[in-house]
Image (spheres, rainbow, N blue to C red):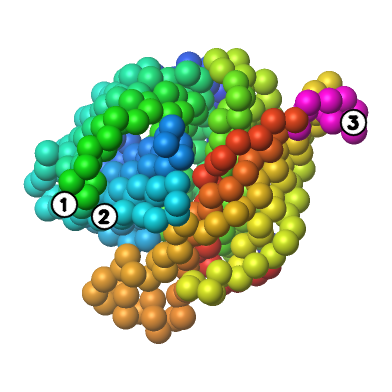
Amino acid sequence: MATKVRLADEAADFAKVGLDKNHIVAREDGERVDPDGENYEWWYFDANLNDGSQLVTTFYAKSVVNPSPGLKPSMEVEWTKADGTAIKEKIEFKPEDFSASKDTCDVKMGKNYFRGDLHHYEIGIFGEKIQVEISFDNITPAWRPNLATFYGDQEENNFSWLPATPRGHAQVKLTANGQTQDLEGDCYHDHNWGDVALMKVMNHWYWGRANIGDYTVIDSYMTTEKKYGHAKVPVFLLAKREEILADDVKYVTYTQSDREVEPVTGKPYYKNIVFDYNDQKNHYRVTYSAEKVITHDKMIDQIDGFKKFMAKMIGFDGAYLRFSGIVKLEILNGEEVTESFESKGLWEEAYFGKTID
């Protein structure tokens, strides 16, 4: 019998931790875990900029793959130009160089920072290869589909996710290769934390987001590990600027097609993934069509010491893939497409477990 998995999305779940299901507060984007425990936490940002480039950065309190007690802060930034060339930098810090507020998003690593209040944010990244100063404001308000995903018959483990900026607009000052540019574009920021190694509970997931005209989409499709019955956990958000149009996952059907195997990691992915939302009153279809794999990382490279040795011994082959391509939104009347929009987008596959499809 499969071990229990539950989405904590009832008002009572929020009340237990002093939160309101229908109102997000600034402390939810602050530090949410005790760094002394076996847990993890990270703050993420990406943007599609007006020169055709894409910018991604993540501030980690510790390794997601290796959530051991104590801080192991690091920061990653990747700028992919319109021609596909990329500049990528990872910086690791000493625990004493890290701080984070519990009251609001205010994360510091050395002189680098990620701070904001659910409405306005600022990020500063000062690496050797690339330096970036970002200022962004929410267009679509902060949203959360649930409080957490609980794992275990006693709900002893959890993973939580807050899309604090489902859609924003960013001003970016970026310096690389001795040249400084002032750029702007639509952006996204989320915050993730949990107390169980994802490879223990999650086999793989797809996660994506895109801004298509006035519309914003955020989608995910998670497949749990065998212990949890390979349960499927979808997420779906469609908003039009500040208005939420659809987010009830019981009306979502997920399909995938055109399977490929990424040669560096050996992990499969689907070039086309589709989220179809139909509540009989409103029918929307979101299709992600991959054009390029822009990141292909082996998770074992993020592990060190004895844990890395053990991971090799058991054949751990987890991988992270990031894609760029076209995201299409179709609005339907019944089964007839009445409107269609598309734009560039970024999405990912995180494959923690053994290949199952």
Label 2 residue SS: strand
Label ID, residue 47: none
Q: Which one is earlier in the sequence, the residue at label 1 or at label 2?
A: 2
Q: Nearer the viewer, residue 188 or 225?
A: 188
Residue appearing at x 35%, y 79% in the figure: 310
Residue holding disc 2: 89
Question: Which residue is located at x 77 percent, y 43 percent?
Answer: 253
Q: Position of residue 338 (x, y in %)?
A: 84, 25
Decide: marks 1, 2 in contact (CB < 8 A)? Answer: yes
Q: Position of residue 108 (x, y in %)?
A: 18, 37
> Residue 336's mark?
3
> Which image quarter is the C terminus in?
bottom right
In the rendered view, does 132 fall on the left or right side of 163? Answer: left
Q: Which residue is mark 1?
A: 128
Q: CA distance from mark 1 to mark 3?
A: 52 Å
Q: Give the left or right position of residue 68, taking residue 9 as reference.
A: left
| Image coordinates for residue 79, horizontal then vertical, percent | 35, 47
Q: Which residues are magenta?
A: 330-339
Q: Secondary structure at mark 1?
A: loop
In the image, farthest residue toward the bottom? 313
List the single residue furthest toward the left.
Answer: 96
Q: Quadrant of the N terminus?
A: bottom right
Specify the quadrant of the image occupied by residue 11.
top right
Residue 338 within the segment the image draws in magenta:
yes
